[in-house]
Amino acid sequence: MASAPQGQQINVTDLDLQQLSDVRRQLEEELTHLTNSFTQLKAALAKFSACIENVKEINPENKDKTTLVPLTNSLYVPGKLCDVENVIVDVGTGYYVKKSRQQATKYYQAKVDFVRGNLETLQDTITKKQENLNFLLTVIQSKLREETQAAGKGGKS
């Protein structure tokens, strides 16, 4: 059994109501997935932006002052800032790297720019999928009206 070529286009107006319903369900699932991904990317963008702000807060005036150090999102312990020129950066998968404040800011800014670019691309995709869904709903409504009118004419004969 040969598979259909990728990118093959089908005119949705040629589909019956059951097929249109299946396509609608698929589009809605895709939109839900894309919207969830968009939300996760927005959260990542906020975290990286917060990291930039946190690095900016480290300055020579704070050296040897007691501060609260986050161990988790809700657990902080008192600590002293001994090195105001370097920070530890989480580079993923449990690895941490010592970087200067300037390097850390540059690293996090690159992350922000990357995520922002992906957000823009994803937003365009979501918009196109939403337009496709709206067109599909219009076609479904049109076919339902046609069937209702045909049933009404068939009953009058």
Image (spheres, rainbow, N blue to C red):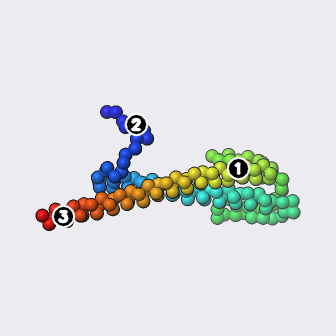
* Residue under the point 44% across and 55% down: 132
Q: Mark 3 points at which residue?
A: 153
Q: Which of marks 3 and 1 is nearer the N terminus?
A: 1
- Check disc 3 and report its element: helix, strand or loop: helix
| Residue 60 x/y as whole percent | 87, 59
Label 3, label 1: how far apart the Cα atoms are: 65 Å
How far is the residue under mark 2 from the one under mark 3?
Answer: 41 Å
Identified at 65% across, 47% down, the residue is 92
What is the three-letter code of the residue carrying label 3?
Lys
Instruction: State which mark lies toward you, 2 or 1.
Output: 2
Give the residue type that dot 1 points to: Ala
Asked whether, in this view, residue 128 is left or right of residue 9, the answer is right
Indicate the quadrant containing the N terminus: top left, top right, bottom left or bottom right: top left
Along the line of sight, which residue is nearer the eye, 108 or 152? Answer: 152
Q: Residue 5 carries which label?
A: 2
Determine the secondary structure under disc 2.
Answer: loop
Residue 123 coordinates in the image, percent (x, y): 55, 56
Q: Residues within 10 Å of mark 2 (few under 14, many from 20)?
A: few
